[in-house]
Amino acid sequence: AAAAAAAATTAAPTTAPATSSSLLATTSAAPLAPTTTVAIPSPPSETGQCWGNCNGHGSCSTSESGQPVCVCNAGWVGAACDTPSCANDCHGQGVCVAGRCMCDEGFLGESCEEKRCPGDCSGNGYCYQGSCQCSSGFAGDDCSRVQ
């Protein structure tokens, strides 16, 4: 039993293989055009093809320097067109992570298009374009004051 325990503790650790997601490209805050040229060249290959053949989400082209580059279809980014993009690039009010917007403080919505209300209206009203519309009997910027 002691020999088995010793063998289990000395097993070599495993490492995950590198993936193309480690080669993400930075995009501008402007909305995506139907296609976006990725500035990061694909790793060179013996056949001169793009890495992963752009994962079926774009087409392989040749850069001015002769490097193979992926031209991604709308909705995809990355050196190998392997990462979903976010709707409206999160309106510049958040960060796109794997196709989902992580909104900055004060914003919400699928693409961070909505301005959050102060205190979320304290549960005493509803938020409309960043301003609280207080229910009857409540007032204030955040509907916290009882009338």
Image (cartoon, helix red, strand yellow):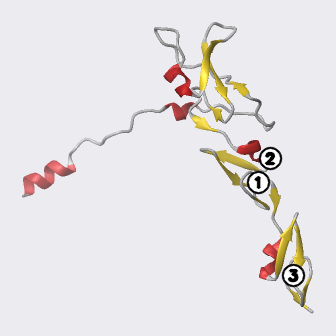
Q: Which residue is mark 2?
A: 91
Distance of label 2 from label 3 (alpha carbons): 28 Å
Distance of label 3 from label 1 (alpha carbons): 23 Å
Q: Which residue is mark 3?
A: 143
* Classed neighbour count for the residue bearing mark 1: other residues with Cα under 10 Å, few (<14), some (14–19), many (≥20): many
The residue sitting at 70% across, 47% down in the picture is 95
Quadrant placement of the N terminus: bottom left
The residue sitting at 81% across, 36% down in the picture is 30
The kind of secondary structure element at disc 3 is loop
- Among the two numbered marks 2 and 3 on one chain, the one whose residue lies closer to the N terminus: 2
- Among the two numbered marks 2 and 1 on one chain, the one whose residue lies closer to the N terminus: 2
Q: Residue 54: x, y in percent? A: 56, 24
Q: Amino acid at mark 3?
A: Cys
Q: Residue 11: x, y in percent? A: 21, 44
**Horizontal side of residue 89 vs 16, given as left or right:** right
Q: Amino acid at mark 1?
A: Cys
The kind of secondary structure element at disc 2 is helix
Q: Which residue is mark 1?
A: 112
Quadrant placement of the C terminus: bottom right
Vertically, is 108 above or below 64?
below
- Among the two numbered marks 3 and 1 on one chain, the one whose residue lies closer to the N terminus: 1
**Horizontal side of residue 108 vs 11, given as left or right:** right
Q: Are marks 2 and 1 in contact (CB under 8 Å)?
A: yes
Count the numbered circles shown. Answer: 3
The residue sitting at 75% across, 47% down in the picture is 90
